[in-house]
Amino acid sequence: MIDTHSHIYAEEFDEDRSEALQRAWDAGVELMLLPDIDSESRDRMFRLAAEHPTRCRAMAGLHPTSVNDNPRWQEELDMVEQLLRDAPVPLCGVGEIGLDLYWSKDFYSVQREVLHAQLELAIKYDKAVVIHTRDAYPEMLDAVSTYRGRGLRGVFHAYASDVEMARKLMRNGEFAFGIGGVVTFKNSGMDRVVADMPVELLLLETDSPYLTPVPYRGKRNEPAYVKYVCEKIAQLHNTTPEKIDAITTATAKVIFCI
């Protein structure tokens, strides 16, 4: 399995990161993709990727909530391009980038500017994008629709809309949809969405340490728990976890050029 979205470099793992990594390997996680947030945590991500170069792949990107009320956002954005030119470790993508209007809509204009700048960087440097969208799917569709036919590829992380929105998004690039612990939540509705989506469009993710799947909901998430997401998708598609593992792993390797 590939956990396509893990923040295992975060402070929440400082006490037992080595043990959490071993639990992931033991659970069958062959690779973790590490999305960037901003310069505050980036060095930690790079150190982990350098320590485990065959098991952890880093990205570069500026998260939309790191743009909010941040007078240094242009400097942060410039850092992302500098890293895409010359990073201390190989980079597999531009992310985590996107739009997040959950906390406030006051920063939409600047979030959109930063999103477009990073989508352009992904095309320029031929990298996959990892796109965060929260309370902003119509706005995100409007943004990515301007890139139709330009070779954009990537994943809509923690996908939380419906099948019709997925179809609309896919018209604008080679996209897959990251499915995490929410699909195991009883009343999330994502089980019905995932059941109606082709497995070939899905990627496994945890978003560790967040969005922990059942049976550990309410506790810290970790990459080993991606197996519960895999098992749930298999149940929804009336197939085996092994088949879901094989298909999602192949999709991830194509999207991220692994």
Image (tube, helix red, strand yellow):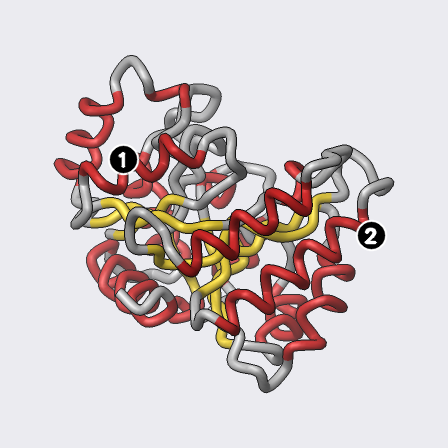
User: Please, which residue is most extreme toward the right here?
Assistant: 106
Question: Which residue position holds label 2?
Answer: 109
Tell whether label 2 touches label 1 (CB within 8 Å).
no
151 and 249: which is toward the camera: 151
Residue at x 71% of width, y 76% of height: 146
Residue at x 45% of width, y 26% of height: 217
Q: Position of residue 26 (x, y in %)?
A: 13, 36
Of the numbered discs 1 and 2, the one sitting upstream in the chain is: 1
Q: Secondary structure at mark 2?
A: helix
Give the image quarter of residue 7. top left
Question: Which residue position holds label 1?
Answer: 48
Residue at x 33% of width, y 63% of height: 252
Q: Position of residue 74 (x, y in %)?
A: 68, 47
Residue at x 81% of width, y 36% of height: 104
Q: Is residue 244 above or below residue 111?
A: below
Give the numbered dot on residue 113.
none
Three-letter amino acid code at the position of disc 1: Leu
Give the image quarter of residue 19. top left
For disc 2, the neighbor class at 10 Å (few under 14, some 14 to 19, many from 20) is few
Q: Position of residue 86 (x, y in %)?
A: 38, 55
Question: Which quadrant does the C terminus fall into?
Answer: bottom left
Give the image quarter of residue 246. bottom left
Label 1 and label 2: CA atoms lie apart by 34 Å
173 and 78: which is toward the camera: 78
Q: Is residue 49 above or below residue 236?
A: above
- Tally of marks: 2
180 and 14: which is toward the camera: 14
Q: Secondary structure at mark 1?
A: helix
Residue 39 visible? yes
